[in-house]
Image: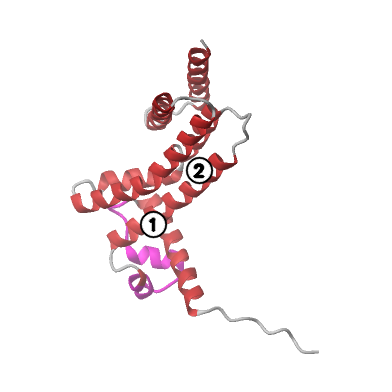
Amino acid sequence: MKKPSVRRRTQEERRRSTTRRILQAAFTVMRKRGYAGFRMADVAAAARVSRGAVLHHFPNKDALILATCEDMYRRAHERSEQRAKKLPPAADPLQAIISDGAEFFFGDYFWTMFEVSMAAGKDKKFKRAAEAVARRFRLPVEAAWFDVLSQAGLPEGAAEDVLWLTLAIVRGLAMRTRLQDDPERFAHLFDLWRHIFWTYWST
């Protein structure tokens, strides 16, 4: 009996697969060594490709780091938008925003990008490019949660105020972990903010 033929991957599929491996490896190197310790050779070793293959896809260190940041932001953006779109009508929108924001701001993606941005702060061109990537992916996430709050009945101004305050609280407590990491206290403060808002809103 004839064995079924195995379809060979196209050149484009191989290119995408290599790019994916490089970006994943670059994130691992960024997370462990930061901007100053980032080396293309280390990325090549982690991705199990040649240094020439890395340079073929990304001509220099900054191009690879920016592409990696963009990839991380895109992944976080896609997850957040899906959560916002699939949120059940009866769910607490404030709790959903807190949970989604906590996953991002307390997670490896945010801290890796934050530390890289801080380390490369003297390079104004790189900093502007990194900030542009952040805006391109995070502002649509905020827009998605703004829509959720609007659909819950909050007027436009109130929805924007609540969104900004909620994300500021989540981001601020994430920064607090560098001084004091207290998950139970953070959870308490998130619940307190929800209680304050809903009590105010219902009066």
Vertical relation: 173 (above or below) 121: above
Give me the residue at 45% from left, 25% from top: 155
* Residue type at numbered disc 2: Ser
Return the x and y of residue 40 as percentages of the image width and height.
Answer: 33, 65
How far apart marks 1 and 2 lie (CA) works out to 18 Å
On residue 80, which mark appears? Answer: 2
The region drawn magenta spans 35-56
- Placement of the N terminus among the 4 image quadrants: bottom right
Q: Is 4 placed left or right of 173 in the picture?
A: right
Q: Return the residue nearer the eye: 54 or 134.
A: 134
> Helix or strand or loop: what does disc 1 sit on?
helix
Does residue 152 appear anywhere in the picture?
yes
Q: Is residue 53 inside the magenta stretch?
A: yes
Return the x and y of residue 149 as percentages of the image width and height.
Answer: 50, 30
Vertical relation: 93 (above or below) 202: below
Return the x and y of residue 81 as percentages of the image width and height.
Answer: 51, 44
Give me the residue at 33% from left, 57% from top: 65
Does residue 123 appear anywhere in the picture?
no
In this figure, which residue is indicated by the disc labeled 1?
A: 68
- Crowding around mark 1 (Cα neighbors within 10 Å: few <14, some 14 to 19, many 20+) is many
Give me the residue at 34% from left, 61% from top: 64
Q: Mainly helix, strand or loop, the magenta region?
A: helix
> Helix or strand or loop: what does disc 2 sit on?
helix
Residue 70 quadrant: bottom left
Return the x and y of residue 35 as percentages of the image width and height.
Answer: 30, 52
